[in-house]
Amino acid sequence: MSEIIETNDLQKQYRMGDVVVEALKGVDFTVHEGEFVAIMGPSGSGKSTLLHLLGGLDLASGGEVFLADRRLTRLRDTAITVMRRRHVGFVFQFFNLLPTLTAAENVALPLLLDGQSVKESSARVTETLEQVNMGNRAGHMPDQLSGGEQQRVAIARALVTDPEILLADEPTGNLDSSSGEQVLVILRRACDAAGQTIVIVTHNPTAAAFADRVVFLQDGALVHEILGGPFDVSAITEAIAHVNV
Ligand SMILES: Nc1ncnc2c1ncn2[C@@H]1O[C@H](COP(=O)(O)OP(=O)(O)OP(=O)(O)O)[C@@H](O)[C@H]1O
Ligand SMILES: [Mg+2]
C-alpha cells in the first residue's frame, strides 16, 4: 500500500504573548491509501492540531506534511486551497451545515464551488446522499434534521467531490450512540467499498474500534499505536489504560 499522508518531525507551537504552547512536538505519522486510522488522546494532547495540519487548515511551525506526494508545508496559500479542495474532505463535530440551504444544496456546494452547474451536480449529489442513507431527506433544511442526519449530510458534503482523504474531528462527539454508530458504519463502508482513506479524531473507544489502526497522542507526541482493526472495544480500552500508566 502506498503512503498518502506522511509527516516528518511535525511541530506546532501556539504563541500567546509570552506563553508558548507546544501542541505538537515532532510527530512522525504515516497513513496508507485506503486505511482507516483513529487518533485518540487526552484533551489538549494535540489531536485537532494534527488533523488541521494534515488538511492544510493551519500552518506547521516546523517539520513537513506530505499529502498525496505533494509537500504541503512548502506550498503557498492558494496552492494549499486547491490541494485541499481536490484531495481532502473535512467533517467536524458540529456538522457546520449552512442553515439556509437544503440538505441537497449543502452537499452540492463543493461541486458548485468547483465550477459545476446545479444541473451537472445533481446526479452526483443524489448518489452521495443515498450513500449516507439520506436520499429521502434531500429537500429538508438542516433544522428539520436530527443531529445524526445532519452529520450524515455533512459526510455526504465531504465525500461528494470523491476526495482521496476524509478527515473527521470527533464526528460522533455530539451524537447519541445509535446515530454515532450509523455514522461510523458509513465511514467504514466508504473505506471498504470505495477505498476511501479516513482519519478520525475521537474520544470514544466504540468509534475508534471501527478503525484499522489507532494511534495515541500524549502531550503533542505519538506514544502508542495498535494495528489490525476493526477491533473489539475492549482492545481499545486496554490500549487507553496502557497509555495512561
Ligand atoms: N489557537 C490556539 N491558540 C493557542 N493555543 C492553542 C490553540 N489551539 C490549540 N491550542 C493549544 O494546543 C494544545 C493542543 O490543542 P488541540 O486542540 O490540538 O487538542 P485536542 O487533543 O484536540 O483536545 P480536545 O480533545 O479537547 O479537542 C492545547 O494545549 C491547546 O490549549
Ligand atoms: Mg480537539
Image (cartoon, rainbow, N blue to C red):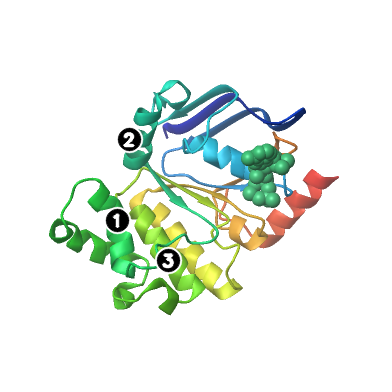
The answer to whether residue 40 of the structure is visible from this angle is no
The structure residue drawn at horizontal position 26% and vertical position 48%, both measured from the top left corner, is: 113
Q: Secondary structure at mark 2?
A: helix
Mark 2 C-beta closer than 8 Å to ligand 1: no
Residue at (42%, 52%) from the top-left corner? 191
Instruction: State the residue position of label 3.
Output: 152
Residue 116 lies left or right of residue 227; in this view the side is left
Q: Are marks 3 and 1 in contact (CB under 8 Å)?
A: no
- Which percent across, then down, holds residue 172? 56, 63
The answer to the question of whether label 1 and label 2 lie on touching residues, with beta carbons closer than 8 A, is: no
Q: Residue at x 49, y 38 (%)?
A: 57
Mark 2 or mark 3, which has the lower sequence index? 2
Residue 194 image label: none
Seen from the viewer's position, the closer of residues 143 and 182 is 143
3 or 1: tag closer to the N-terminus: 1
Q: What residue occupies the far front of the structure in this picture? A: 17
Q: Which mark is drawn over residue 109?
A: 1
Q: Which residue is mark 2?
A: 82
Which element carries disc 1, helix, strand or loop? helix
Disc 3 marks a residue whose amino acid type is Arg
Q: Choose mark 2 or mark 3, whichever is in front.
A: 2
